[in-house]
Image: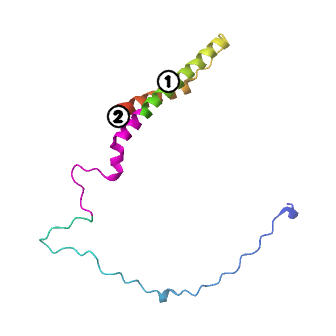
Amino acid sequence: MYPEYQQHRPEPPPYQPTGYQPSQYQPQQYPPDSHPQPPAGYPQQPPPGGPPEPGDLPVYLQAAVSPEAEQARANKGARDIGFGILWLVFGLCVTGWSIAYFEGVGYIVAWGPALYGIYKIIKGVLATRRSR
């Protein structure tokens, strides 16, 4: 349409073979099995490090049940309850203000903040229960 605005793109270079020939391919020889199975009748050896003891937890779960983690979970639950109450009160205040301001013409029900506040309160109560 407007040739002066069209960009000139250079042509790509022609294909040049790399010299690789599939007939020259040789499959790799893998080393022999470094962990041979014991003969029949002998017990299987446990994996390196051995199996965990019956009461032991894996390292990644040990921090989750520490007293500090329980306390942090309880603090987060209490904080969620507090913020949930704030959101719920905010939603109710906006709804109350709109009912008083518009005086029968209509009003705004701020159900989003109120619903989020209820969600945060439930989440906080569950978190504090779980931390006990």
**SS for dot 1:** helix
Residue nearest the observer in this picture, 23 or 120: 120
Identify the residue at horizontal 86%, vertical 64% (top origin).
3
Q: Is residue 105 above or below residue 82?
A: above
Distance in Å between CA atoms under marks 2 and 1:
20 Å
| The N terminus, quarter of image | bottom right
Identify the residue at horizontal 15%, vertical 67% (top origin).
43
Q: Position of residue 114 (x, y in %)?
A: 53, 24
Q: Earlier in the sequence, mark 2 or mark 1?
A: 1
Which amino acid type is marked by label 2?
Answer: Arg
Crowd band around label 2 with a 10 angstrom C-alpha radius: few (<14), some (14–19), many (20+): few
The magenta stretch spans residue 57: yes
Q: Position of residue 13 (x, y in %)?
A: 71, 79
| Disc 2 target residue | 130
| The C terminus, quarter of image | top left
Are discs 2 and 1 less than 8 Å apart at CB?
no
Identify the residue at horizontal 34%, vertical 43% (top origin).
66
Q: Position of residue 27 (x, y in %)?
A: 41, 84
Segment colored magenta: 49-74
* Rendering colour mode: rainbow
| Disc 1 target residue | 85
Q: Position of residue 77 (x, y in %)?
A: 42, 32
